[in-house]
Amino acid sequence: MAGMTGMLQTRRNQMIALAVLGVLLFILPFAAGALGQAWVRILNMTLLYVMLALGLNVVVGVAGLLDLGYVAFYAVGAYTWSLLASAHFDLHYPFWILLPLGAFLAALAGLLLGTPVLKLRGDYLAIVTLGFGEIVRILMNNFDKVGLPWSDESYNVTNGPRGITGIDGLNFFGFKISKGLDLFGLQITSLQLYYFVFLAFAILSIIGVSRLQHSRIGRAWQALREDEIAAKAMGINTRNVKLAAFAFGALTGGLAGGLFASMQGFVSPESFGLLESIMILAMVVLGGMGHIPGVILGAVLLSAMPEVIRYAADENMQQKIFGLVLIAPEVLRNLIFSLAMILIMLFKPAGLWPSPEKK
Amino acid sequence: MMTDMLFTAENVTKRFGGVTALDNVSMEIPRASIFGLIGPNGAGKTTFFNTLTGLYQVDEGKFTFDGKPLNVKAPHEVAEVGIARTFQNIRLFGEMSVLENVMVGRHVRTKAGAFGAIFQTPSTRREEAAITQRAHELLDYIGLSKRAGDKSRTLAYGEQRRLEIARALATDPKMIALDEPAAGMNATETIALRELIERIARDGTTVMLIEHDMRLVMKVCHHLAVLDYGRKIAGGTPSEVQRDPAVIKAYLGGAHTEVTK
Amino acid sequence: MDVLLQQIVNGLVVGSVYALVALGYTMVYGILQLINFAHGEIVMIGGLTSLFAAKGLLAMGAPPLLALLVAILAAMIACAVIGVLIERIAYRPLRNAPRLAPLITAIGVSILLQQLAILVFGRNYFSFPELISKAPIVFGHITVTLNEIVILLTSFGLMAALLWLVHNTKVGTAMRATAENQKVAGLMGIDINKIIAITFAIGSGLGAIAGVMVASNYGQAHYYMGFMLGLKAFTAAVMGGIGNLWGAMVGGLILGLVENVGLIFVRGDYKDIFAFVVLVLVLIFRPQGLIGERVAERA
């Protein structure tokens, strides 16, 4: 009986915590909006990074496959949206085609990458995925003149380093998010509307990924990570299981990519460099590999931290404190950021919030 | 061929370069029996085992399992056929819980996919419940229920060995192959292990025991095969094997382990 | 045909620099199984340090050859010290940590070094003084510069010296023993920490010289020069078979050759892709790299 009430009590506490969190998440974009719309954009990017980190966590954290080119899948999603919903080709497909299509193509790219590298292990896999990411970026940069590499005749597919502009925003069956919303006198900006859309997708990703992780296939991923030979002896077809991990990680990345393009209205290869892949990997590792709450924490910290530091390290701020600008804000931001990465790993090698010893 | 044989090897030969690791080895394992494969270090026990489990392909000869030719191309097909194994140097999934380790063993007998997991379809939920229940039963069977939620790497040595057996049993094997399960165990743990092995055989699963601990082998096995330098030098019941001069020579000549009771 | 020969020569020059940098990656990997992501930045620091040292010396009226030698020495010392410090501070405490932890600190160190380079040297592209003549020398249909010849000869000399050191000296034997099995090497009385520090010092020293070579060959240096170079050199090391000295050298040379010979057939914009496409192809057919040992699956 006591156990029963105890359980109900924890259940009630959980509900309360969840309700508080819900209210906070609802208020957040309006509080940020009061500081300026730039802060809302940072919130939105944070939500995208949560999705990306969760997707990469499936590959690296759960299945134990070190992928250094994850951002390529994000790029596939973003470019799918950008090419098929912009002035570039004057195509304007709706989101309910483009988001699934981008996710599907990204998953396909995941399989394409996964198939040849199945036999590779550890760091060999890391460098090949890194190479794959770079190949995708270089192709985006050079596909403004697609033709046979040795001929001069060419077509402009990606508009090269200049990127694609004039990308359609999200558009729900006639309702344009980019216009914002006047809800009985409550002004909701376009970015704040994006926030709610992204929040919904992030929550869906969390639910989906955590269900997967605690399923038959999720256990197979973990077994693969822990001991490939033992996993095989248990009858796990490691080839298929690895491919599934690549595909699911990629799918999440592709979805986030489409959302990113719709909000930004502009994409260029610059957003999809190796550093971005590394950043997402750092979110997973710093947060706590394979542990969903940790990964979310890592994503929130690493995507918000640079922006907060940028604000704090602002020239005006330095002027006020020291009377002169000591260090360019951008440099100071990166300095603090890289130092934080090093220190967190030195003091918490398993991440800030690793999976608990007892489940 | 006799019908009550679960597993037979006929004239199996395996060469590595110029070395003949297995030379014309034949043996038969009756259903629900405990069969011991013994021999000094380097006798070919592990090679035999790896060939049987698909890590290497045989050069000559063949295996028959459960009335059909055993022909595995990849290690993961072995569990599907009905042969589960444990490892000499314990290979648990250390960061997964004790219960999850056993649940992984159910993988090969279940089929829920990613779609079912994400949308929690009724059939997936039923299957998941069945997996969990079976895993709990097996933990009960080996006496590790209390540790179900702990990470498996936190278990004591003997417990880890037993968990490996439970994980193998979870694949519903017809034959379970134990690779030196008593290695590193103390006397009490070994007795508990012996009881567990006997119970497994009584419950209908054939046991193949690859072991150094003579005392255990002689006590627990119904039949034995002795390998030395890749050849089978003796076979039969423990008392027959014990009296076999070739065996005594192989062991005493190699100054390895005393053959005593 | 002439074009092909010319590109082979160019490829050898670039490839020998890749090989030097790749050696730094592979030595550290061989001993610690760690991708030292910061190694590219070491090369950059070597390039920038030598550039400023050489400029300073020239301004004081030193002869070009002396300026070059002193600049190289300064770069080597600076890089060796930084390399050893990085190992001591950022990698050593994590030797028994989960495998990805030191990789993340390595990435952190890499970013940190870039930012420090901006603070110390600035963001600009600095031009490297012409210390060795870059006037074209014509051999039949091939054109080279004295600078390129010196780079090629120095690289091969250094590689030979490293091989000799590893195989014929006490330190080299200790390095190989440590790479083989740290625990056993420790039990045999080898000071593991010292050997690892020496490995970092040597790798960084070689990286410094590679930095000088790149800066002098392209006539410039800047804080971002180590990134792509490091990436390609690491690719070369993996292609050859990571952890294997010969693999790094062969991988580096092949990468340089493929890139430059490929330019005959494909537009220059795609140059950076070659490295990765070749890498993927090599690893599909030889998952352990060209010269790497096969890691057997043990049951």
Image (cartoon, rainbow, N blue to C red):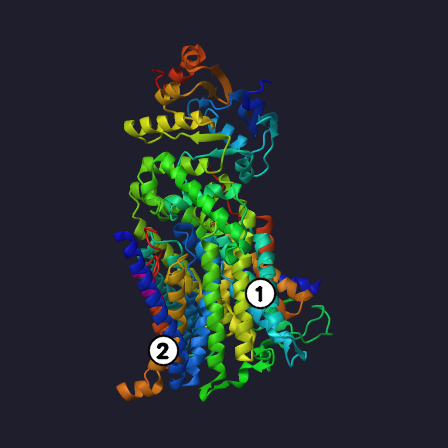
Q: Is residue C125 above or below residue B137?
A: below
Q: In which chain is the residue bearing label 1?
A: A
Q: Which of marks 1 and 2 is nearer the N terminus?
A: 1
Residue B228 shown left or right of residue A258 in the figure: left
Q: Do labels 1 and 2 share a chain?
A: yes
Mark 2, residues whose alpha carbon is within 10 Å: few (<14), some, or many (≥20)?
Answer: some
- Boundaries of the magenta span: A341-347
Q: Which amino acid does label 2 sit on?
A: Val
- Disc assigned to residue A103: 1
Q: Which one is in front, C222 or B144? A: B144
Across and down, in percent, residue A117 comes to 56, 53
Q: Does A343 lie within the magenta span?
A: yes
Query: What residue did someone put label 2 on?
Result: A308
Residue A53 shown left or right of residue A156 in the figure: left
Across and down, in percent, residue A219 comes to 46, 49
Across and down, in percent, residue C23 comes to 46, 56
Q: Which one is in front, C249 or C51? A: C249
Q: In which chain is the residue bearing label 2?
A: A
Secondary structure type for disc 1: helix
Quadrant of residue A299 within the rendered picture: bottom left
Quadrant of residue A62 within the rendered picture: bottom left
Secondary structure type for disc 2: helix
Q: How many labels does the image show?
A: 2
Across and down, in percent, residue B143 comes to 34, 36
Question: Decide: marks 1, 2 in contact (CB < 8 A)?
Answer: no
Q: Which one is in front, B175 or A111? A: B175
Q: Which amino acid does label 1 sit on?
A: Ala
* C-alpha gap between disc 1 and disc 2: 31 Å
Q: Does C111 lie within the magenta span?
A: no
> Which is in the foreground here, disc 1 or disc 2?
1
